[in-house]
Amino acid sequence: MSKDISYTMEDLIEKTRTYLKEEEVEQIRKAYFFAEKCHQGQFRKSGEPYISHPLHAAMILTDIYADSATIMAALLHDVIEDCGVEREEVEEAFGKEVGRLVYGVSKLGRINFSTENEYLIDYYKKIIVGMSEDVRVIIVKLADRLHNMRTLWALPEEKQKKIAKETLEILAPLAHHLGIHKLKSELEDLSLRYLKPDVFYDIAEKLNKTKVERDNTVNEMLRYVTNLLTEHRIPHEIKGRAKSIYSIYNKLNKGRKFSDIYDLLALRILVHTEQECYLALGIIHSKFKPIPKRFKDYIAMPKPNMYQSLHTTVFGIDGYLFEIQIRTYEMDEVAENGIASHWAYKEHKDASVLMQNTTEQKLQFFKSIIELNADKMSTEDFVNSVKEEVLNNNIYCFTPKGDIIELPKDATPIDFAYKVHTRVGETMIGAIVNNVIVPLDYKLKNNDIVKINTSKNSKGPSREWLNIAKSTQTKNKIRSFFTKSEKEIYMERGKDSLEKELRKRKIPYDEFFLPEHVEMLFQSLKVNQLEDLYLEIGNGKYSPSMVVNTIYRKEEEVVEHPKKVVIKSGDADIIVSGIDKVKVNLANCCNPIPGDEIIGYITKGNGISVHRTACHNLEMLEERNVPVSWSEETKEKYLSTILIHCSTRENKMLEMLQKMNMLDVGVDKFITMNRGEDTVYEVDLFVRNVEQLEKVFLELNKLPYVTKVERLMR
């Protein structure tokens, strides 16, 4: 745990000499003196000269055999932010690689990690995606945070708890997924110490009370196992393994009693080869009875962070339960110190290159982050994905060929199918798990072997799958399928409607689509291609007659500049070209609001009726249309009717009302319509303009059970 040791520059040089080349050590010395000069006169809250902080962070990194560039970045990580040094100056003195790392850590330092901050969602995305650029940036950040946690006593209690919370929720899980157990374990214990000091010290006291008894039992078991392995000529080393206070807290938090936590007694056996791991396991099981279902083979099936080991729990000396881990020295190096430590330590290879290559190949954590960002999901969905599917405990299932598929806990065969390939998900018709046919809402478990049955004749996923799938990625792929399908339907509908209109008005198709006409359409209707035009007609934004009139009326127009008169009628601020003192009404069929494109219709005896240009009723009214527009200043609220499609029959009205009230939207009517397993709500709102209505759509679409929100046009 916390180590109150004061290091010097000579300690750092001595430690790095044990595994780095002399020219690299000299660069580290140079970086130290550069940082010391920059931080001259600066002090920490604990009263120490500021340079002690980057020095301690660098020393933490030597424990995991970090490469020279990473250690130099740790020494220099605050000079840009706190000393006004430019990135170019660092690059000129120490090279572009170190400059890039220092700048990367500085960027993270400027981001507020606080889990209480209302802007957490946006920050979280920047943090996680930024981390994926170079793993070493995160490793420096972890070392920086660990030393800050060791000296957290110098800060006020409120700040202690804030920093401890973000460490536990954001940084410790990153250390876990990077496989750096040494950093992860201490970060967790220190966080608990400041978040729940009573619990921390209670566990520590209980451990101290039983320490003598536990040590005696462990030593006796250690001697027995040593003799056993020596007798079978297996060279080895055995260590008693202490369980962290935080891991004990987690078990107590799940309802376990302190006396029932059997893996307080633990041994770790280190051997030279993978074969010796299995031989040692067989020998131990021949003498000590193992507990069923407590054996795990992480050598044959490594964790995504490259962790490898055999785990077993046995009835040991005097009936005490012992958890035993068996691994090679190299596996232990990776488990304790992370993904590149043993190469840097043993072979003096370029650790930075190996670290990056290994990350690309095996560190599924960062692959998952990059995949999530590439999906272009909403920021909130992205954050939920990161928290629920990447930073939490995942499960690992197999394809029939033995490929490992990583999934979030409680994932279903639907998630599995889409993880294999989007096309597999879209053509899925059923699933077989461990040779048994299962329903699509079956919750997969670790080590399940999953076969997905597909059919070329499949019509694609069902909307109901949105309620079954666990992964946000999967749900977004399903939504994308329906969006794409609906888009194609609207485009086909729009093309047919336009062709029908041209036939009705006896306008030759080739004449209408002359290049100059097409260009005029694109400019007037603000579309970039014909497919977009068909889509806008199909979804009701433009009527076919209006599109045709765009060409033929413009050709017949005489250029005039009629006067504009602002007509106040009821709650409408409408400008009518060339007409004074006329009654203006907003049409009830489409309920236009400021920001909508509008057109007026001269009624018989009831003034001008204002419609949205997308209103389908305009097809019957076109001969008596008149140009109208919104006044630049509108202060009233206007009626708009929307339909909210939900994938559940549970009453979610209150939650949706709260969302709308937060946006200062007046709700006049809320009608519920049940359709099978789904529910549709018809809601009358009063909004200021289209922009405010779009915000309502955005907030409602964030709700997990909302599948679609649309404006109603009668």
Image (cartoon, rainbow, N blue to C red):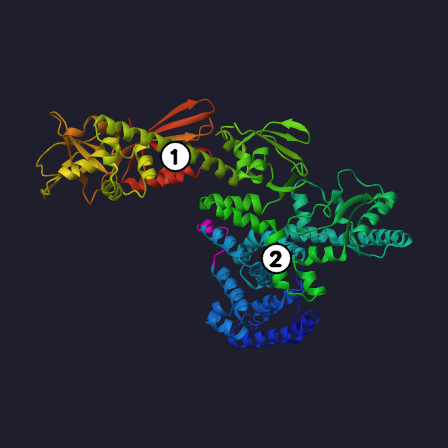
Q: Which residues are magenta?
A: 111-121
| Residue depicted at 11% across the width and 25% down the height | 605
Image quarter for residue 337? bottom right
Q: Earlier in the sequence, mark 2 or mark 1?
A: 2
Image quarter for residue 76? bottom right
- Viewed as shown, does residue 232 lie left or right of 548? right
Q: Which amino acid does the dot numbered 2 rest on?
A: Asn
Q: Is residue 16 above or below residue 293?
A: below
Relative image position of residue 668 (x, y in whole percent): 31, 30
Quarter placement of the N terminus: bottom right
Secondary structure mostly taken by the magenta-highlighted segment of the chain? loop
User: How many other residues sit within 10 Å of disc 1, few (<14), some (14-19) or many (≥20)?
Assistant: some
Disc on res. 357: 2
Q: Is residue 269 among what the camera can see?
A: no
User: Is residue 573 on the magenta stretch?
Assistant: no
The foreground one among 504 and 210 is 504
What is the residue that sits farthest to the right in this orientation? 231
SS at circle 1: helix
Quarter placement of the C terminus: top left
Q: Is residue 56 above or below residue 356?
A: below
Disc on res. 319: none
Q: Is residue 362 above or below residue 96?
A: above
The foreground one among 137 and 319 is 137
| Residue depicted at 60% across the width and 63% down the height | 147
Relative image position of residue 212 (x, y in whole percent): 81, 54
Disc on res. 487: 1
SS at circle 2: helix
Q: Which amino acid does the dot numbered 1 rest on?
A: Lys
